[in-house]
Image: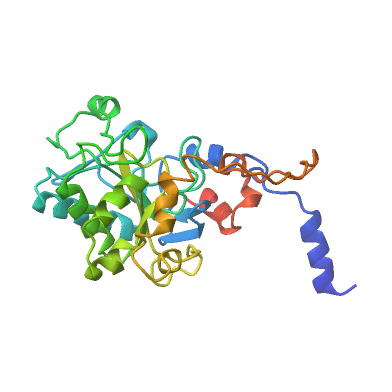
Amino acid sequence: MTIARLLLVLSLLAPLPAHAEKLANKLFGAIDAPSAQDPMPIGSYAKGCAAGLVELPETGPSWQAMRLSRHRNFGQPEMIDFIIGLSVAAQQLGWGGLYVGDISQPRGGPMTSGHASHQIGLDADIWMLPPKRLNLSVAEREEISSIPVRSADQRSVTENWTGSHKRLLQAAASDPRVDRIFVAAAVKIEMCKTAKASDKKWLQKIRPVAGHDTHFHVRLKCPKGARLCETQTPTVNELSNGGNGCDDTLMWWVTDYLNPPKDTKKKKPKEDDAPKKKGPREFIMADLPKQCSKVIEAN
């Protein structure tokens, strides 16, 4: 047996690190501070972690971080810079600034509740509620809620939707760092009503996804040089068939999605022993990129 093969065998027989079989969300959720590492998103938006994150200050001249008890106001430097810049743009549009929801945990990773994504510091939720003031107390930030801009039947926007909401989304999507923005389907349908040919580049980034009636979810591209970051596919251009996304694929969300057509075909019986796909809250460290162990262990 060669020395190289012997070392391989020994490495396979070596005991796993103590945290290897623990639920990843418990490990990442228990950490209070970012790692003292160079910034790096590791893995994919829904299966990864984040090194060297930066904290969004709880309050700034044009924003407030909400739900501070969740301790999810951490992001890649590009994300924090994006949020601050967008909050200034919001003030220029007549808003008081921005109320910022979840970004990521101090070291990213799967969360103990809520999101499947937000794991690598490149996702952020922005409330649809225009701030009236930016001096909310910690307690007030736990009690106050955002506003729905989508009707209860999911087919149209509510009276809460305004032109400034559209302009804010346009400003966000026009930033070249943005990969896509998730909104309620009714919001995109409303935006498509006044779409112009020149709007295609940014409007195709506005993507309909269920569960986004009180906030919009911004997802940034992998930063330049982030070699461990996995870019999301398909691209928004592919999803929009090279257009702005104001097509039948959009209308599906208020037709077949809400009232699925009956399937007349006989379904194949499910195998009781068929493997079930793990959800983010079931991940153990071995399910994540190997570099995430170093993020957990770092100072």
Frontmost residue, 15 versus 140: 140
Q: Residue furthest right?
A: 1
Residue found 71% across the figure and 49% down from its top:
16
Q: Give the residue at the far bottom of this rendering.
A: 2
Q: How many marks?
A: 0
Query: Split into 4 quadrants, where in the image is the N terminus?
Result: bottom right
Q: Nearer the viewer, residue 264 or 205?
A: 264
On the image, the x and y values in percent for residue 8 come to 79, 65
What residue is shown at x 37% (from left), y 61% (from top)? Answer: 245
Q: Residue at x 41, y 65 (%)?
A: 240
Residue 255 spot, x, y in % from top left? 44, 45
Residue 273 location (% of width, % of height): 80, 41
Which image quadrant for residue 136?
Answer: top left
**Horizontal side of residue 278 vs 168, given as left or right:** right
Asked whether 197 or 4 is in front, the reply is: 197
Q: Is residue 28 above or below residue 7?
A: above
Residue 14: x %, y % from top left? 77, 53
Please give the name of the residue rendered at 46% of the width and 37% of the height, measured from the top-left corner.
114
Residue in front for this viewpoint, 203 or 243: 243
Query: How is this picture coloured?
Result: rainbow
In the rendered structure, the answer to whether residue 114 lies left or right of residue 187 reads right
- Viewer can see residue 170: yes
Would residue 52 be seen by someone viewing this image from the given angle?
A: no
